[in-house]
Amino acid sequence: MERYYQPELECASRETILALQNERLVKQVRHVWDNVPYYRKKMEEKGLTPDDIQSVADLHKLPFLSKDDLRDAYPYGLLAKPLKDCVRIQSTSGTTGKRVVAFYTQHDIDLWEDCCARAITAAGGTDEDVCQVCYGYGLFTGGPGLNGGSHKVGCLTLPMSSGNTDRQLQFMVDLQSTILCCTPSYAAYLAESIHERGLRDQIKLKAGIFGAEAWSEEMRRDIEKQLGIKAFDIYGLTETSGPGVAFECSEQTGMHINEDHFIAEIIDPNTGEVLPEGSKGELVFTSITKEAFPLLRYRTRDICVLTREKCSCGRTLVKMSKPMGRSDDMLIVKGVNVFPSQIEAVLIEQGYQANYQIIVDRINNSDTLDVLVEMTPENFSDSLGKITEMEKSLVAALKAMLGIYARVKLVAPKTIARSEGKAVRIIDKRKI
Ligand SMILES: [Zn+2]
């Protein structure tokens, strides 16, 4: 049963999708103008009225919204429906001190769950599956989003939330979970625990839907190999609803954006200018179906590329590349842009797992970059007398990737603290 595969939308012609987007955008701009004084003021400052937006071609005229706007307008300033019509809030983790609160009507929740159901269906999920959701539940969108999507697909849903690895593994074996939803770093940790406990033959997982943090192709291959599954990426952010804004299909070369709900643009992060298709830049979303918290031209800070190349799955929805880093996460070390995903790629390629910590400091006005890398039990037992050699080899590989020198220190297995949610991998002492 594939209720949530909708070829009439997912495989529609560009003209069909554009017509739908035009109609929904015009309506949405009017809705925001009428109900969100904060954004109306921004439009007025640019001399705009809703009549100036007749189609997607006019989208570029609208002002952007950024995380700063969300903070300024906290908590109700961007709400477009009376509170009595809202049934839920979700919130960002606030790890960077910028908590965002998003509001949902029941209709918004339904559409969000539909998007997640589409993602689960694209990963091969049906009502025959047992879907273990170990994203956090609560304010974080990961758990509730995939939980709702899993219900809609008709999977038997295990609302595990994050943590308690013993219990996760027990249910995974006893209830024969077939789909795993969590952060990629937790999937890697579960894979490691399964291997240690000799449970590999007792698990029946076939697919994983992993998102909410950056992960490399190398990490994907590593998790797929260790768990014997196909690992799919999923994208979303609290500001635009949560996971399910974009999802990966069997081709695994980027995520299809649900264009019937969101219009995507790529802009130059410095000038705000819209870039032509295929350019690398900052991803901007306009939600055209949300009622309570309809953000127009929201700057995600994610750097990626959009492509409309034909996909072997048959879907025509535009595809976004895996984010190549967040403009927030990007470190500038000795004037060079460094993304944690680049460091991770080198580690995995050299036979390590993605357990590492990046420490940036400034000593005598010069930046230093230290990478703490945890050895796997295998390379730990091989390491006797060879640590310096192994470290040198990593230093050379990192230099080749980043173009700058990083000091590398190998540490024993299990010495870097594990995270059950998003991994805390960067310590930038220059900001402390
Ligand atoms: Zn596809």
Image (tube, rainbow, N blue to C red):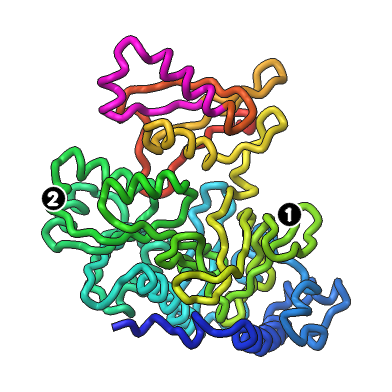
Q: Are marks 2 and 1 in contact (CB under 8 Å)?
A: no
Q: Is residue 405 left or right of residue 383?
A: right
Secondary structure mainly formed by the magenta segment: helix
* Highlighted magenta segment, given as a residue range: 371-398
For label 2, being within 8 Å of ligand 1 is answered no
User: Residue 121: x percent and y percent?
Assistant: 36, 74
Query: What residue is rendered at 25% in x and 21% in y?
Result: 381
Nearer to us: label 2 or label 1: 2
Of the pair 150 and 4, the residue shown nearer to us: 4
User: Residue 118: x percent and y percent?
Assistant: 41, 75
Residue 332 falls in image quadrant: top right
Of the pair 135 and 154, the residue shown nearer to us: 154
Tag 1 or tag 2, which sits nearer the N-term? 2
Q: Quadrant of the N terminus?
A: bottom left
- Is residue 251 visible to the viewer in this orientation of the structure? yes
Q: Which residue is mark 2?
A: 201
* Vertical side of 413 occupied by 327: above or below: below
Q: Which mark is residue 198?
A: none
* Vertical side of 169 occupied by 142: above or below: below
User: Residue 156: x percent and y percent?
Assistant: 22, 72
Query: What residue is rendered at 74% in x and 84% in y?
Result: 55
Q: Which residue is mark 1?
A: 269
Q: Amino acid at mark 2?
A: Asp
